[in-house]
Amino acid sequence: MDATTLRPNQVLAGPVQVALHPVPKADTEPERRWRALADAALEPNPFAAPDIVLPAVRHLPGGHDVRLLTAECAGELIFALPVTRGRAHPRVPLPVLQAWDDYDPPLATPLLHPEHAVLAWLAVRAALGGLRAAWLRLDPLAIDGPAAAALTEAAARRGPPARYVETWQRGAVRRDSPAPPPSGRTRRGQDRRRRRLADLLGHDVELVFHSGVPGPSSDLIDRFLTLEASGWKGRAGTAMRDRPGEAEFFRALTTRHRTQGRLEMLTLQSGDRLLAANVNVVAGTTLFCLKTTYDEAVAPASPGRLLIDAEIETFRSSTPHTLLDTCASPDSEVVAQKYPDHRTLATTLIPGSTTAPHLLSQALLKAHDLTTKP
């Protein structure tokens, strides 16, 4: 195929075709190919996969502006990422493609074919200019993961390196990290919280793990939404039920993951009363913590901390996953205290392979205090 046969928003980069497509409809061949890449990706990221992106496009504001950036080689999809057009920084007027963030994804790592990741990065970078973008902005990229390693290798072969902005760490649990048994003090604290909850409620409390198929019911998801809206988020108007399309988005994505056995919930309950709950999704061998909430009426007994302790123990003893990503904000003190491991992330600016290095450096250094990956 030569350049004259390419469709608009499509660029030929060596043996790879790079294109911007409308987001595929569900149950179509393009969506199935996208899903297959997500299932086999070098680094799992459910926030770039159909089961979260399609509900977000359908239910959330801004969905009509989203395109799927893809790279294809010999008929096989090797790169996929939902993107929009924007600017890397208000002070830097050069145009960028940026990972779509209207649904607050805690990870913007692209889906990369495990055998062709470096080729995919090379092709996407070479094509950015033809797609009218100077850079690709990912907020955030896990810079200690294999996708970032492949990006570094691609930059070593051609073009200026990526720039990492506002690097931070967030809590995680890695199965291969040392796992000291809970101390007697920790156990006593857990028992004390359980007793306090039972005393407050007049009933015993129990932890329930919901996974597999059918997994957490739609009724349990609705109870989760009700509990979240009853607390401080409801008073602030930021609960999912209070924001346009968010409750519908949440129900749709949990339904999609539940039907595939990729939805997990850990709940703290007293009879039929929901006291605290975590909603998690599975991608590859990684467990991503999607949402959490608790009943503020029993806050003195710290139900959220009790749930965190139980989640870590359940992850280590009852699941096959190798990594638990809390997806928490960097300012969460509880997560920093309770989770023993971390992931390193950064807002990442990736220049096209033909971007003038001096132009990139001058523009970015004026706008940011930048550091490159150690």
Image (spheres, rainbow, N blue to C red):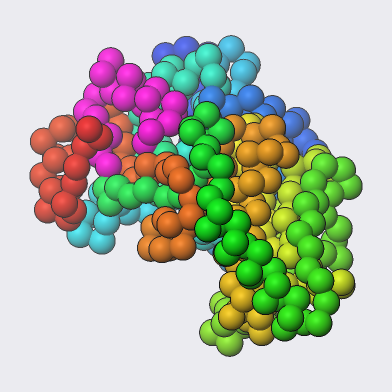
Residue at 75%, 48% in the rendered image? 263
**Image side of residue 254 versus residue 98, left or right:** right
Q: Residue furthest bottom?
A: 235
Which image quadrant: the C terminus? top left
For residue 247, above or below residue 16: below
Q: What is the x, y in percent for residue 255?
A: 80, 53
Quick check: is 154 in the magenta stretch? Answer: yes
Determine which quarter of the picture holds residue 362: top left
Which of these two is toward me, 242 or 179?
Answer: 179
**Image side of residue 68 versus residue 119, left or right:** right
Which of these two is toward me, 204 or 292?
Answer: 204
Determine which quarter of the picture holds residue 154: top left
Give, as a single range, the part of the protein colored magenta: 143-164
For residue 27, above or below residue 158: below
For residue 353, above or below residue 105: above
Q: What is the x, y in percent for residue 3?
A: 45, 20
Viewer can see residue 115: yes
Viewer can see residue 8: no
Q: What is the x, y in percent for residue 226?
A: 74, 76
**How many numbered badges does the structure rendering display?**
0
Residue at 85%, 61% in the rendered image? 218
Residue at 51%, 40% in the rendered image? 180
**Image side of residue 195 versus residue 64, left or right:** right
Q: What is the x, y in percent for residue 132?
A: 36, 40
Quick check: is 215 in the magenta stretch? Answer: no
Residue at 64%, 34% in the rendered image? 321
Which of these two is toward me, 73 or 341?
Answer: 341
